[in-house]
């Protein structure tokens, strides 16, 4: 994401060079290198204030910021597009995305995030993010957070490099969600047990990634996300069985109306 400072009214979309999305319950992979300018059908875009914080694609996902906007602006991609999907929790999954922040100058802060959620409004959700801030007491670092019924718990992890690979990993056997960096340093990750299936009671999860700005005004710098990769049990939305039921129900309703009219 390039922290560019021009005002844009619409964000250019994002493209996935994807993929294999298999039938529900089958292991599959989604890969997005953000080439091109057309959003892939897997994603929809949420931007709380696109005039001040948004995303655009240029062989990577770029942050565009004019700030300051509201206290907390989101600009994220969600996996609930017209050909969207969820990750099933009956098996393991792994999500990674590269991040980089260079030459950050300005006021406020920006975070590059990767997360999962049971619901689209984030009441039961978890994310890992790298943050850069103008606050000299916390210039940059990694942090994780999870929500239960919209009550958030934050977990600071460690000072980390300004570029790396964010990771969200799930181990079904132990119901453990791991948030952190995809590297060899165990202090760059935190595991939250008994959260996904036990506490959230989630059979499947949405995927999200993007940026958050807090009182953000840029005077220089770049922020990017690239090379998203997801491996797990992927369920298409709507699932073929569900779609068949919807279509059958609609057909039966039409038939019943015709019968009533003819009677």
Image: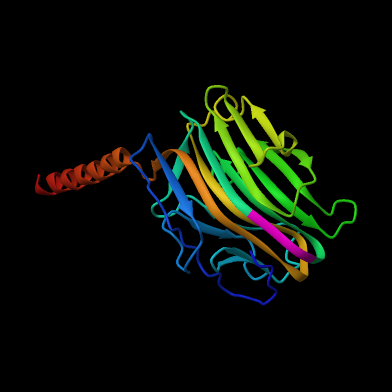
Horizontal arrangement in the rendering, residue 44 relative to residue 198 (left or right): left
* Residue drawn at 27 percent across, 39 percent down: 245
Is 100 inside the magenta-drawn segment? yes
Horizontal arrangement in the rendering, residue 174 relative to residue 146 (left or right): left
Q: Quadrant of the N terminus?
A: bottom right
* Residue drawn at 47 percent across, 29 percent down: 91
The majority secondary structure of the magenta stretch comes to strand
Which residue sits furthest front? Answer: 184
Is 173 inside the magenta-drawn segment? no
* Residue drawn at 45 percent across, 58 percent down: 16
Q: Is residue 150 at least partly visible in the picture?
A: no
Q: Quadrant of residue 171?
A: top right
* Residue drawn at 70 percent across, 34 percent down: 190
Q: Quadrant of the C terminus?
A: top left
Q: Position of residue 169 (x, y in %)?
A: 58, 36
Q: Position of residue 48 (x, y in %)?
A: 63, 60
Horizontal arrangement in the rendering, residue 134 relative to residue 14 (left or right): right
Q: Position of residue 46 (x, y in %)?
A: 56, 58
Q: Is residue 56 at least partly visible in the picture?
A: yes
Q: Quadrant of residue 28?
A: top left
Tell me if residue 255 comes above or below residue 53 in the rendering: above
Tell me if residue 186 comes above or below residue 221 in the rendering: above
Q: Position of residue 142 (x, y in %)?
A: 74, 46
């Amino acid at each position: 994401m390039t922290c560019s400072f021009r005002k844009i009214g619409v964000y250019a979309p994002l493209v996935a060079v994807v993929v294999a999305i298999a039938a529900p319950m089958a292991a599959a992979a989604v890969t997005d290198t953000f080439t091109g300018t057309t959003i892939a059908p897997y994603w929809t875009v949420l931007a709380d204030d696109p005039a001040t914080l948004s995303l655009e694609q240029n062989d990577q996902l770029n942050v565009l910021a004019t700030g300051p906007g509201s206290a907390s602006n989101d600009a994220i991609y969600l996996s609930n597009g017209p050909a969207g999907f969820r990750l099933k929790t009956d098996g393991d999954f792994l999500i990674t995305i590269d991040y980089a922040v260079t030459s950050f100058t300005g006021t406020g802060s920006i975070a590059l995030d990767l997360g999962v959620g049971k619901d689209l409004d984030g009441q039961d959700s978890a994310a890992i993010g790298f943050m850069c801030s103008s606050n000299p007491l916390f210039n940059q670092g990694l942090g994780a957070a999870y929500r239960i019924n919209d009550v958030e718990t934050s977990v600071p992890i460690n000072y980390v490099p300004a570029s790396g690979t964010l990771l969200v990993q799930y181990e079904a056997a132990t119901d453990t969600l791991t948030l952190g960096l995809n590297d060899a340093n165990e202090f760059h990750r935190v595991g939250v047990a008994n959260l996904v299936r036990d506490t959230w009671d989630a059979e499947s999860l949405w995927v999200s990634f993007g940026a958050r700005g807090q009182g953000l005004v840029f005077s220089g710098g770049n922020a990017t996300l690239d090379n998203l990769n997801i491996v797990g049990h992927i369920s298409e939305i709507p699932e073929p069985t569900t779609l068949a039921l919807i279509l059958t129900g609609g057909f039966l309703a039409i038939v019943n109306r015709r019968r009533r009219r003819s009677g």
